[in-house]
Amino acid sequence: MFGNKKSFGGGVELLVVGLGNPDKKYENTRHNAGWLAIDAIAETLDCKVDRVKFKSYVGECNIAGRKAMLMKPTTYMNNSGQAVVEAMNFYKISPENVIVLFDDISLDVGKMRIRSKGSDGGQRGMKSIIYLSGSDKFPRVKIGIGAKPTPEWDLADWVLSRFSDDEQKKLAQVFENAAKAVELMADGKIDRAMNLFN
């Protein structure tokens, strides 16, 4: 069923989007926590996110009985909205059916927070999505990447730094929880997801 070309073309009801940057130099950096989460979710669902469409790497799967598209926009973080809104328009999907996963410096590594809607919180990928779609009603999963270790650190340098081995172990658990949360959210049980994982 997965990777079957015939199943493609309309019918997608849900977008699950992980934010990140496409270049090799950004691989496994803090800012790519959203991409890393999508990779983990894809693995859980036995779904390949390897086709190029909507300025993204995409793959289709079923989540909670709904046809979903996993997306990793390749537009660079600050223009994430271009990819997301293009897919939303193509499938006529409302913001409430777009789950966005992204990094959050206000949460420690190992923590995640689910919200049903809200402001971009200073995250530029979310800012682009909200601006271009004209809505802030996107359910989201924020993945903690930790605050700057010292005030002297440049924020850009910090978010583009890599996780330590210890942090990567914590992330593995977070991604497992993110996959479970996305399944609950896809099933309309966002409150339950918040109670379990916030």
Image: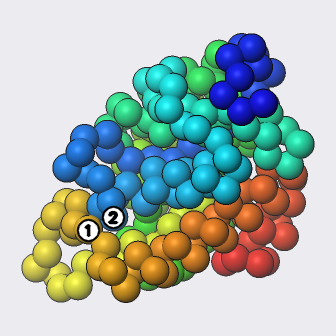
Residue 108 drawn above or below residue 105: below
Point out residue 52 in the picture as x, y percentages from the top left corner: 47, 23
Residue type marked 1: Arg
Point out residue 50 in the picture as x, y percentages from the top left corner: 50, 32
Q: Secondary structure at mark 1?
A: loop
Which residue appears at 55% of the width and 31% of the height? 58
Residue 158 drawn above or below residue 26: below
Camera sees residue 197: yes
Q: Secondary structure at mark 2?
A: helix
Q: Are marks 1 and 2 in contact (CB under 8 Å)?
A: yes
Cα gap from disc 1 to disc 2, whole angstroms = 6 Å
Residue annotated with mark 1: 162
Which residue appears at 52% of the width and 73% of the height? 172
Sort mark 2 into few (<14), some (14-19) or many (20+) by Cα contacts within 10 Å.
many
Residue annotated with mark 2: 30
Residue 22 figure quarter:
top left
Point out residue 30 in the picture as x, y percentages from the top left corner: 33, 64
Residue 103 drawn above or below residue 97: below
Which residue appears at 54% of the width and 64% of the height? 142
